[in-house]
Image: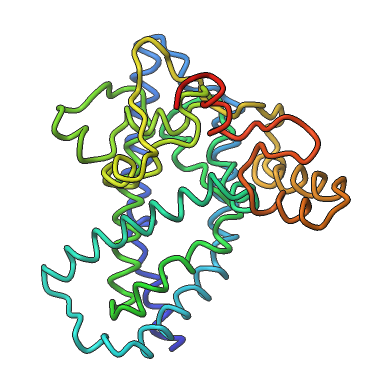
Amino acid sequence: MFERVMAVMQDDLVMLALPVFFAALLIEWLWARKQFRAVYEGQDFWASMRVMVLTVFVDLIPKFLGITLMFVCYDLSPLSDWVGRTAPWWLLLFFLDDLTYYLFHRGNHEVRWMWAGHVSHHNSQYYNLGTALRQGVGERISKYLFWCPLALLGFDPVMIVTMMSISLIYQYWLHTEAIDRMPGWYEFIFNTPSHHRVHHGSNTRYLDRNHGATLIIWDRLFGTFSQEQVSEPVRYGLTRNIESHKVLDVAFGEYKNMTRDVARADRWRDKLSYLFRAPGWSHDGPDKRSNTLRREAGLS
């Protein structure tokens, strides 16, 4: 088991893609300078790089345990002898992986304790390929559990982790303002920079929208899609932005906020609500959850 898990971890396509990521980042930075676009800011960029390094180390143990659990599920699955590595199975896995990511990502925005682990990917007020590397640190703890059911369905963990990596590599190019819109048919089916700019917006219209990975069809099907509006430019960041560029504040600051909210609630039901309800819920103040704000603004 140990050897199988380590083999999967060592063959990480995302790590192999890092040189391409940084080359693209340099090209985008040069483009921004030539266009006089304030896409990068020094302190913010280096905060993103520090979060990236922190994520690599934090991810080691959860990834090892998660892949180990995948192998346990795979070995227990009665379907493992049926599922092969031929093209039809890879195609089915692509859709299942993409749906799994949508559900996981949507949970990161609609469950407070999950949001606390994901928020570091959103608390930059700049949108660039450096922000793409500013991953959610705390979310690594629970992430791999969401993909274990695919192993129970008989998919080899090697296939699952490979598809997860391909998905993350695809999502990298979405974090740019250098690309306006793709052709209409592509925008309808696939996630694009335009759709993902919406996802990083703090505008009421754009909050908690467009959770897809490679495909945008899940958002269209489940009512979480929003089109980028020319008349309403995206404001990046949070509804209440952080002021610090310190890596621990960026990565873990929301856990402190959540703990403070839990502590000031008297009833256990309210304490649990601060953990499991959406960000913005309050037991003694206005409801600032995204769906409530949109409804009050007449946007839903």
Taking the image as shown, residue 117 lies to the left or right of residue 173, namely right
- Horizontal and vertical percent position of residue 33: 40, 15
- Horizontal and vertical percent position of residue 229: 35, 17
The residue located at (69%, 53%) in the rendering is 275
Color scheme of the displayed model:
rainbow
Quadrant that contains the N terminus: bottom left
Whether residue 56 is situated above or below residue 4 in the rendered picture:
above
Q: Nearer the viewer, residue 296 or 235?
A: 296
Whether residue 240 is situated above or below residue 249 in the rendered picture:
above
The residue located at (33%, 26%) in the rendering is 227
Q: How many marks?
A: 0
- Horizontal and vertical percent position of residue 71: 40, 83
The residue located at (47%, 80%) in the rendering is 68
Q: Nearer the viewer, residue 43 or 210?
A: 210
Taking the image as shown, residue 239 lies to the left or right of residue 299, namely right
Q: Nearer the viewer, residue 17 or 257?
A: 257
